[in-house]
Image (cartoon, grey):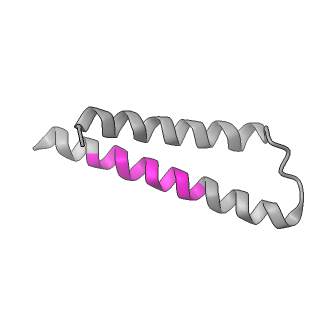
């Protein structure tokens, strides 16, 4: 994958997940969905960090 595309996708995933998490836009309020929401947010953030690190690694090489 293109190094710039990896960095862009990583930043979009991280910023999008943090934005949705901060706004609580979809009204996740029940206890059963809180666990799922937290897990999904962390999963998306970790994938974003992975893409970001892959892109930065490609810049070095």
Instruction: Kindly give the residue lying farthest to the right in the view shown.
Output: 30
Q: Quadrant of the N terminus?
A: top left
Looking at the rendering, the stretch of residues picked out in magenta corresponds to 42-54
- Examine the rendered structure and indicate whether residue 61 appears above or below residue 50: above
Residue name at image x 27 percent, y 49 percent: 54
Q: Residue at x 58, y 57 (%)?
A: 42
Describe residue 21's horizontal placement relative to residue 17 as left or right.
Answer: right
Residue 33 occupies quadrant: bottom right
Measuring from the top left, give residue 49's x and y in whole percent: 42, 49
Report if residue 32 lies within the magenta region.
Answer: no
For image coordinates 38% across by 33% down, the residue present is 8
Magenta stretch containing residue 45, yes or no? yes
Instruction: Farthest residue to the front: give it.
Output: 1
Assign the magenta stretch its main secondary structure. Answer: helix
Q: Where is the C terminus found, in terms of image quarters?
A: top left
Picture coordinates of residue 21, whole percent (x, y): 70, 44
Picture coordinates of residue 10, whole percent (x, y) = 42, 41
Residue at position x 79%, y 37% in the image: 25
Rendered location of residue 44, percent (x, y): 54, 52
Relative placement, left or right, of 25 versus 20 is: right
Q: How many marks?
A: 0
Please, is residue 6 above or below residue 47 in the view? Answer: above
Q: Is residue 35 left or right of residue 48?
A: right
């Amino acid at each position: 994958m293109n190094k710039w595309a990896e960095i862009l996708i990583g930043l979009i995933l991280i910023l999008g997940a943090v934005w949705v998490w901060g706004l609580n836009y979809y009204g996740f309020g029940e206890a059963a969905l809180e666990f799922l929401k937290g897990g999904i947010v962390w999963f998306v953030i970790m994938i974003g960090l992975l893409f970001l690190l892959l892109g930065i690694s490609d810049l070095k090489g």
